[in-house]
Image: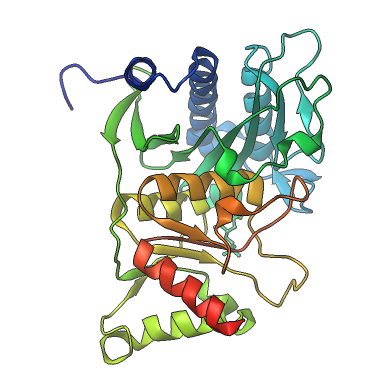
Amino acid sequence: MSDNPISLSRYLIEQERRHGHIPGSLRLLIEQVARACKRISRAVSKGASSGILGSAGSENVQGEVQKQLDVIANDVLLEANEWGGHLAAMASEELEQIYPVPHRYPRGEYLLLFDPLDGSSNIEVNVTIGTIFSVLHLADGVRDVGAEHFLQAGRDQVAAGYCTYGPQTTLVLTLGHGVAVFTLDSEQGSFVLTQEGLRIPESTREFSINMSNMRHWAPPVQRYVDECLQGRNGPRGKDFNMRWVGSMVADVHRILMRGGVFLYPWDRREPDRAGKLRLLYEANPMAMLVEQAGGMATAGTERILDIQPQNLHQRAAVMLGSREEVALLQRYHAEAQ
Ligand code: P6P
């Protein structure tokens, strides 16, 4: 670690000075989100000692049982960001409706979307989980913000990131000009820059998918995974390894750091659903990060960031990571049409 580590605040100020592409209000918003993630990290790290593990006894809009920490993380993010004056409204995986900033606070030009605690089914078994967030710009002149203002294609995001709560607490962030990684220095209590200009290797030997769903996949995905499993004697000519943490932030973080391809494709268990993962606050922010790091992110034949959302909690098939693999998946889907 350098003697004079660069803090998140200094990084953002220098990005603003160097590129001028970070309005002060966006910089302050990112800093607020980071502060909220530090609070969530502290709550998560206490684990069973805090008595806040386990179910909250309620379900979210997705019909999933909420963990106490899901609710706590959601509340931390709402409370940390509602008063700053940078936001007009927020949207969360845990809330059916959008959360307009209360009238007692000034409203700003941004919209913040988040999955407050992704992978929370892993909490009780101490596996890395995380917060995923996305920032959109509110159209000019909008006075009464509604859900329709969140329905922007992912290519219109102004920032995206996630925070992992694992062996380290890391904040991975893009403002549209590359990907930077910050690690929480728990002694200082601040995020310090540990990597910038992240690049995903174009080729890989590692794929990430929940293999137990194999019989439910569409043919292009079956074809792709089958060829990976054939290894060096098959058409790919090389052996593959498989990793599946079951926590999107953990799987995507590994891919950003060392390459690989992550798949949560459509499957016939829910034929009317595009997939399990949500477009606005899971697929889009991860797709922006992956593309900013030189990778690709597709829903099959369509670039994820080009999908025009129809509703706040809609789902998308997600295949993202090393360019060579995602391009092959995209070709297999096109050939199957
Ligand atoms: P499965 C966690 O519940 C999550 O939304 C993602 O973080 C993760 O990638 C996926 O679902 C895991 O799904 O079906 O393997 O449990």
Is residue 259 shown above or below 73?
Answer: below
Furthest residue toward left = 3
Residue 209 image position (x, y, % from top left): 49, 69
Is residue 189 shown above or below 297?
Answer: above
Q: Is residue 11 left or right of residue 86?
A: left
Q: Residue at x 29, y 35 (%)?
A: 196
Residue 146 image position (x, y, % from top left): 82, 31
Q: Quadrant of residue 50?
A: top right
Furthest residue toward front = 140
Please identify the quadrant where the C terminus is shown.
bottom right
Furthest residue toward bottom = 233
Is residue 183 shown above or below 108?
Answer: below
Q: Nearer the viewer, residue 151 or 163?
A: 151
Residue 118 image position (x, y, % from top left): 58, 46
Q: Is residue 163 left or right of residue 124?
A: left
Where does ligand 1 appear, by image quarter? bottom right
Q: Residue at x 62, y 19 (%)?
A: 80
Q: Residue at x 74, y 48 (%)?
A: 313
Q: Nearer the viewer, residue 186 or 291?
A: 291
Q: Is residue 317 left or right of residue 312?
A: left
Q: Is residue 190 visible?
A: no
Residue 188 image position (x, y, % from top left): 33, 17
